[in-house]
């Protein structure tokens, strides 16, 4: 026997379908719809802006072959998204508007070699400087290596900045352009390319093993890295002269008494000048060359090499050979490793004072006496 519902519940039961229908209707009106969960790995990339799509279409079409400035369309989109928009009516500076105009001109004028480098990631001095662009892109895509944009731009000036820009040709080599190629790629794949875009030479932005360093490149980076109280050469001219008197070695050198070793430390000084500037100086500070098999002195081999080159007559008369020179030098204060060296503090009866004056003696031979221990190095 079926039980009857209580009289008071009957209206509620009869009204339930209508109420449910009304509830669903209200939600439909409110615009609430079913959603499908999309796993994070399936989420789409942010859409490319109309301005970036237009710019990248032009630059990929007009800058090809040896004038190609992006390896892929995605890389162009990545760089574009990091650029300030700028004003299309006044397309200047490190902006998208400036690059878009240069990309357009590359097609209109038929002179891609003139306009494509400026249309690329660096700007090439037309749309901002290459260093400004490199540092801005590194800050956008990677963890910045220096605290401020201004510091990055200042240190970037020590990098070799070659003419033109070719995303394929400049993919390797110790140049600012190589770093621009990889910092551009880092806007798409930072895990892979940020490490390649460092101020320090890192594969593939490094010279092949066995490459003889140039004095011009070394002096450019050391004069940029080591300034003011950390300066280890009076001038770039002095640096070039001292460099020419040292064994060149290779860019892979890390402890030899060579230009290659000093260049490594000059690059390291871009990020850690207090640690590395002295090692890039004329003496090497025990990090670029030891005296024979000794582990207690590190500046004398370099000092005697320079003394023989700058003050040959006095060197031959007093010492006759480098072994005798190094033995004499080893008794002078500051002969040891990590004694420190800077132009500003090289004074008194020290090897540092002698190194400073022998460096100056290439230009002024009257300073050979001081380089041998006479005043003011007495």
Image (tube, rainbow, N blue to C red):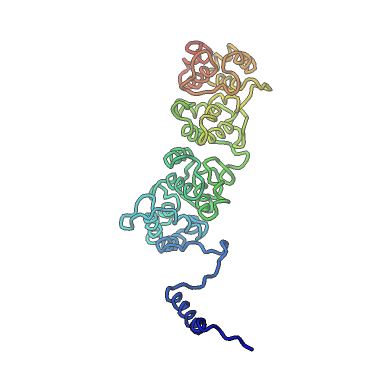
Give x and y (percent) for residue 113.
43, 54
Residue at image position (54%, 48%) is 194
Task: Identify the residue at the far left of this view.
Answer: 89
Q: Quadrant of residue 206?
A: top right
Give x and y (percent) for residue 116.
43, 55
In front: 210, or 51?
51
- Image quadrant containing the N terminus: bottom right
In front: 67, or 222?
222
Give x and y (percent) for residue 88.
33, 58
Residue at image position (40%, 54%) is 115
Give x and y (percent) for residue 17.
50, 82
Instruction: Give the side of residue 58 with respect to residue 91, left or right.
Output: right
Instruction: Give the side of residue 60 with respect to residue 4, left or right.
Output: left
Task: Identify the residue at the far right of this view.
Answer: 293
User: How many numbered marks have been drawn onto this rendered protein structure?
Assistant: 0
Residue at image position (54%, 30%) is 276
In front: 240, or 152?
152
Q: Is residue 280 above or below residue 25?
A: above
Q: Is residue 303 above or below residue 46?
A: above
Q: Is residue 119 above or below residue 234?
A: below
């Amino acid at each position: 026997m079926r039980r009857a519902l209580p009289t008071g519940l009957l209206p509620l039961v009869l009204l339930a379908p209508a109420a449910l229908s009304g509830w669903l209707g209200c939600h439909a009106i409110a615009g609430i719809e079913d959603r499908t969960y999309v796993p994070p790995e399936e989420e789409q990339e942010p859409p490319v802006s109309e301005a970036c799509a237009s710019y990248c279409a032009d630059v990929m079409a007009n800058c090809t072959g040896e004038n190609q400035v992006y390896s892929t369309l995605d890389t162009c989109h990545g760089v574009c998204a990091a650029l300030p928009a700028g004003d299309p009516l006044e397309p200047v500076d490190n902006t998208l508007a400036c690059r878009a105009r240069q990309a357009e001109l590359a097609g209109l004028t038929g002179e891609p070699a003139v306009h494509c480098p400026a249309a690329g990631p660096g700007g090439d001095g037309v749309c901002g400087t290459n260093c400004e662009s490199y540092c801005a892109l590194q800050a956008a895509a990677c963890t910045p290596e220096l605290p401020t944009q201004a510091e990055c731009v200042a240190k970037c000036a020590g990098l070799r900045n070659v003419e033109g820009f070719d995303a394929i040709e400049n993919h390797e080599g110790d140049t600012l352009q190589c770093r621009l190629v990889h910092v551009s790629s880092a806007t798409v794949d930072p895990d892979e390319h940020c490490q390649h875009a460092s101020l320090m030479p890192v594969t593939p932005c490094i010279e092949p093993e066995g490459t003889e360093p140039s004095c011009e490149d070394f002096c450019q980076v050391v004069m940029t890295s080591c300034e003011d109280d950390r300066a280890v050469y009076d001038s770039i001219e002095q640096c070039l002269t001292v460099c020419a008197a040292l064994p060149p070695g290779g860019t892979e050198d890390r402890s030899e008494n060579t230009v290659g070793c000093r260049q490594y430390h000059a690059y390291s000084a871009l990020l850690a000048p207090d640690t590395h500037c002295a090692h890039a100086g004329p003496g090497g500070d025990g990090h670029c060359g030891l005296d024979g098999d000794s582990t207690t002195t590190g500046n004398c081999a370099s000092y005697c090499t320079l003394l023989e080159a700058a003050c040959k007559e006095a060197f031959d008369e007093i010492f006759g050979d480098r072994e005798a020179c190094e033995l004499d030098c080893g008794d002078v204060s500051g002969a040891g490793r990590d004694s420190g060296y800077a132009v500003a503090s090289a004074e008194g009866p020290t090897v540092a004072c002698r190194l400073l004056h022998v460096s100056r003696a290439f230009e002024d031979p009257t300073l050979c006496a001081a380089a041998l221990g006479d005043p003011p190095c007495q």
